[in-house]
Amino acid sequence: MKKFLIFMFPVILSIFLFACGVEQEKNTNFYNLKLAYDSQNNTLSGEMVLDYYNYTGEVLNDVCFHLYPNAFRENSSQSIISLANYNRAYYNGKSYGDIKILSANKDFEFVGEDENILKLKLEEPLNVEEQITLKIEFECVLPEINHRYGVGENTINFGNAYPVLCVYENGEWDMNGYNSNGDPFYSEMSNYQVQILFNDIYKIASSGELCNEYIEGENRIVDIKAENVRDFVFVLSEKFQVIEQKYEDITVKYYYYQDEKPDESLNTSVLALKTFTELFGEYPYKNLCVVEASFVHGGMEFPNLVFISDSLNSYETYTTVIIHEIAHQWWYGVVGNDQYNHAFLDEGLAEFSTALFYEKNPKYNISRSEITLRNQSNYNIFQKVYVDVLGSIDTSFIRPLDEFNNEQEYVYTTYVKAYLMHDSLFELLGEKKYIKCLKEYYEMCKNDIATPDDLIKAFEKGSGKKLENYFYSWFEGNVVIS
Ligand SMILES: [Zn+2]
């Protein structure tokens, strides 16, 4: 595969260098990725050139990257899937994958027992606000698995399939690894120019905008730009059918293969985009791809692209997952947060935004109060059972994914209890003030990383009330829900 890479890229480069014309802004990291997928061997070869800007406020001696695919190695110490989901994920028996670093323009070493962090060591310290160009050549092996990263039963999913810059904070690089609870990712806004080569039997869905494409032999080569996004993802499938619809100047594309109501799914997607734009603020991109995918969980958010699992048990659930994942374009996408340590920030809001969507669109015949009652009842049962069995329960929000005792505790805390917190704020403040607070949160934190304290600040500003104690009673798990 490496040979293929060497022969192929100079040809592509000569034709398409700067074809996308991504405007490079100072202070925004710029990834230039050249990828080639070999469907015979399930491998993705890549060359990455990163223009890295040191806006950490500190002099740096190294730059670190997450190598998420190494969580899929044999005997990995990181958990990628809970036991309960094991058989649905590994549809063909156990399968492994990884990412190998073939070369870099700096000395490098790996950190972590699964080599999940790549550290490039700089020859000279990189001063504050200085820029450096880093080059990494890599090869990914995709496992056979219905997951973010892997060859699934119907789609090939390329989530986190390249070295992703770690976030630098509090004097160190964030190095959290994979976890089967939640979405263990944390990244900052960057610009991307990506060229992807793949066999023309496949159709592609991706983050960003397609700038150019052409056929070379049996391969299709696409040139994509994605500006001001936290990540870049693409999905391939031989089975994709595509329909699209516009909302103002944004194109919503729906990729599907077994959905029997594709027009309804597309309509819901467009309506979600419209409803959330009106409620929270603009969706600052030209494209949104909603993708039916081989995925073990219900759905997954990426910038400009969401997975909706092809194995959900009802069309009502499928619709709810579409709405939830599109809400993440605001909460995770535009307003980012550390999903490893503060998962409740984006999940709680995506859940409550879904209820707001149903409230604003009565034709779906689901009301916010109905969802709230169901969540209260489920949460109380969960609490009772856990206290009965274990004697006590931890429902605090602010803790890393690996400190949740199991998937149930994660889901009931991060989704259900965080939903109930937003619902109680909605009741306390009234709809008008609650929405004003969310708009404030969006404006205050857009393109940035929000913390739990930012959520409090935005709600105090938007409502004119002192809410810190109120929020902390929820954050710390003291609140009594009845
Ligand atoms: Zn979610």
Image (cartoon, rainbow, N blue to C red):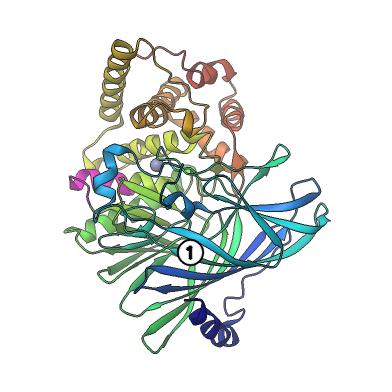
The answer to whether 142 is drawn above or below residue 318 in the figure is: below
Q: Is residue 262 above or below residue 360?
A: below
Q: How crowded is the residue under tag 1: few (<14 C-alpha within 10 Å), some, or many (20+)?
A: some
Residue beneath the point at 51% across and 18% down: 476
Q: Quadrant of residue 120?
A: bottom right
Task: Tell me: 387 left or right of 231.
Answer: left
Q: Would residue 48 appear left or right of 219 to someone viewing this image?
A: right
- Along the viewing direction, whichever of 364 and 397 lies nearer the viewer: 397
Q: Position of residue 114 (x, y in %)?
A: 51, 48
The segment highlighted magenta reads: 311-322
Looking at the picture, which amino acid does disc 1 mark?
Lys
Does residue 320 belong to the magenta stretch?
Answer: yes
Q: Quadrant of ligand 1?
A: top left
Circle 1: element type: loop
- Please give the name of the residue rendered at 47% of the width and 23% of the height, measured from the top-left corner: 429
Residue 320 screen position, x and y as percent:
28, 43
